[in-house]
Amino acid sequence: MKKVVAIIASVLAAASVLVGFQLSGPISGQESASALTGSAFSAGNIISDANFYDGDAMSASQIQSFLSSQIGTCASSSCLNNGKFSMNSRGSDPMCGAVTGGSNLSAAVMISRVAVACSISPKVILVTLQKEQTLINGSTARNPSASRLERAMGYACPDNAGGHCDPAYAGVGNQVYWSAWQWKRYGNPAGTTNYFTWFNPGGTRQIQYNVPTSCGTKPVAVQNKATAALYYYTPYTPNTAALNNLYGTGDSCSAYGNRNFWRLYSDWFGSPTENAKPIGRLDGVTGGGEVVNVRGWAIDTTTTAATKVHVYVDSKASQIIANTTRSDVGRAHPGYGNAHGFSSAVTADPGSHKVCVYAVSVDGARNSTLGCKTVTVVKASPFGSVDTAQAVPGGIRVRGWAIDPNAQTKPIGVQVTVGSTTTKLTANRVRSDVSRAYPVAGASHGFDAVIPTTTGTQWVCITGVNVGAGADKLLRDCVSIRAVGSVPTGRVDSLTTTAKAIQLRGWAIDGDSTGPVNVDVYVDGVGRRVAANVARSDIAKAYPAYGAAHGFTASVAAAPGPHQVCVYAINVGAGSGNPTLLCDTVEVGSAPVGRLDSATPVSGGVAVKGWAWDADTTAATAVHVYVDSAMTPTTANQSRPDVRRAYPAAGAARGFATTVGAAPGVHQVCAYGIDANGGTNTTLGCSTVTVR
């Protein structure tokens, strides 16, 4: 086997490390995938960045299942699907995050830990284990020798040392870690020198076909970092002969390392350049004044269009677009342009939050995690309290305090909106309680004002006016307040009549005074003044600043019959006019109700039966029965349960039954209910009767 020297300017003590076996031919035990042809190989795009740097592409359990399915039954205890290996724990550096090692680890666990820490796809590691030492599939994989395991990834195992590896990098665990580390180093990450440049994407590179320079070179337009990393690791590209016999050998100038990598990846995992997750990086996440600031870049490698980015603050998602200019991204990923950066502020409540950022693919099915970080968000917008918001003489009183963190000790503005009118205040009154709670802000942050308004229910909102970063903030939820203007208000709750009187009940308030006001009651144009000073707990609850003494009752004598009743609240203080609380027509007293059920001829007269009730009295109602012009009085005082059912207030003793004398012949019989107040009598019924 032939190996190539790759110079490493890094934290390694050695000036150079030998990496990258390239196998001389096809890998034994690997069956051909007939659908794959060498013509599909692209020397400038062997694998996409998204697929190469996807450290979460497979979990440890998925890696274990893959190893078991590929290796099958192991002939010893050293296979990668059943062996136990050691790996050193390592801290983080610019290439990889911290890795937890151990002395009895499965290959799947080691591969998974390294993949996540270094953001190198487990699929890339698995393919390289096969490409370099045939440790995944075939007879060698079912009984690997110690020397094969020692140089599992071909890292730092130069030919001039007889194939042995530098002890610092020997063994499965070391090989997996340092190969992944080196692939990341090829990208010259922040914190390292810009050493690896000769295969960098963005230009046409002359890449050898094999070690002898006589085999020549191929001009390759390297398209991405991942492809460049493969060439740094194995610096040869397959010639036509190697690609024409994709699962076999070519000619003396054929090299197979990158061909086999591409073929193995395609056979095992599908196209290494398609269906790739978006790529990108979260450069920074910081908490600010009620915002989380996120900065980075993202590219969906299936399109040159701007990529969507989702930012989760805890469980709340926001979408931004990675479309700002990042020339560094454009240089590193030529062909996609520069417009793939993002730098946005996402709103967040004050406190500690976990922020996770995702690059979203065009189809929404291949999203990539760019990173997560916990940050602290501080207050930026105004905050405070509304201690009082209620109707008082003169309008609506608002009292409270407000502070804006950006204004420090300076007072800020407060806007009070009552209905459609906004009044501006300054929160500059001394509030010692506020200075005790917020000593840095000081005491001059209180407000207390009466906002004039009109009578009626008003929607009241009180807002702190923002200074600097942040936004205007409600100091409390908007509230509905029943306000009283300078013109009095009130209501007649009930208007009833008795047999001889009109009775009223209600309340009245004038916004200019907490004391009682007068109410004028007019019956048929004749007025009577009543003081609204009766305690009403419901009014005190609705208008707490005015107290309870705002109710009124009145009883006005009136003759039976219809009457016009008007009630006016009498204005005091400012305002003009005495508003009408009620104007209506009522009936004093009520005519009797009832019915002549029957008028039946009998010997010597007529038997009459019926019922009558006058609601103006509890006494039995008088009934006059006329036979022609002769009247006979009777009283409706007999039991009639059916009347009680129809008129529960009447009771049962509302029936009448009597016999009225009459000569033989035809007679007109009528019965009348007599009004108890001398009002209109009620005809209960008439009937023509023939007495024989």
Image (cartoon, grey):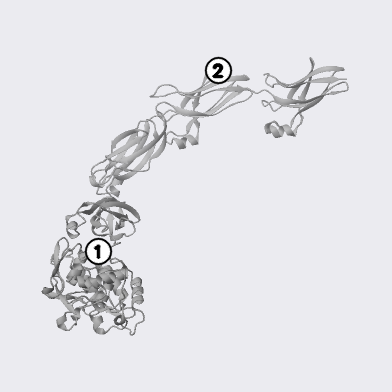
Q: In the displayed structure, would residue 83 be above or below residue 497?
A: below
Whole-number angstrom distance, CA of label 2 to CA of label 1: 97 Å
When asked about the image quadrant of residue 650, the answer is top right
* Horizontal relation, residue 189 to residue 103: left or right: left
Q: Can residue 36 be seen in this view?
A: yes
Question: 405 and 230: which one is in front?
Answer: 230
Image quarter for residue 110?
bottom left
Relative to residue 557, is residue 5 drawn left or right? left
To which residue does mark 1 refer?
Answer: 48
Image location (x, y in percent) of residue 438: 28, 49
Q: How crowded is mark 1: few (under 14 residues within 10 Å), some or many (20 or more)?
A: many
* Residue 408 shows in this picture: no
Dot placed on the residue nearer the N-terminal end, 2 or 1: 1
Label 1 secondary element? loop
Label of residue 664 in the image: none
- Residue 324 position in % (x across, y down): 21, 51
**Kind of residue at badge 2:** Asp
Helix, strand or loop for disc 2: loop
Image position of 543 (left or right of 639): left
Res 524 label: 2
| Three-letter code for the amino acid on which mark 1 is drawn | Ser
Horizontal and vertical percent position of residue 297: 23, 56
Q: In which quarter of the image is residue 229?
A: bottom left
Observer-nearest residue: 623 or 27? 27
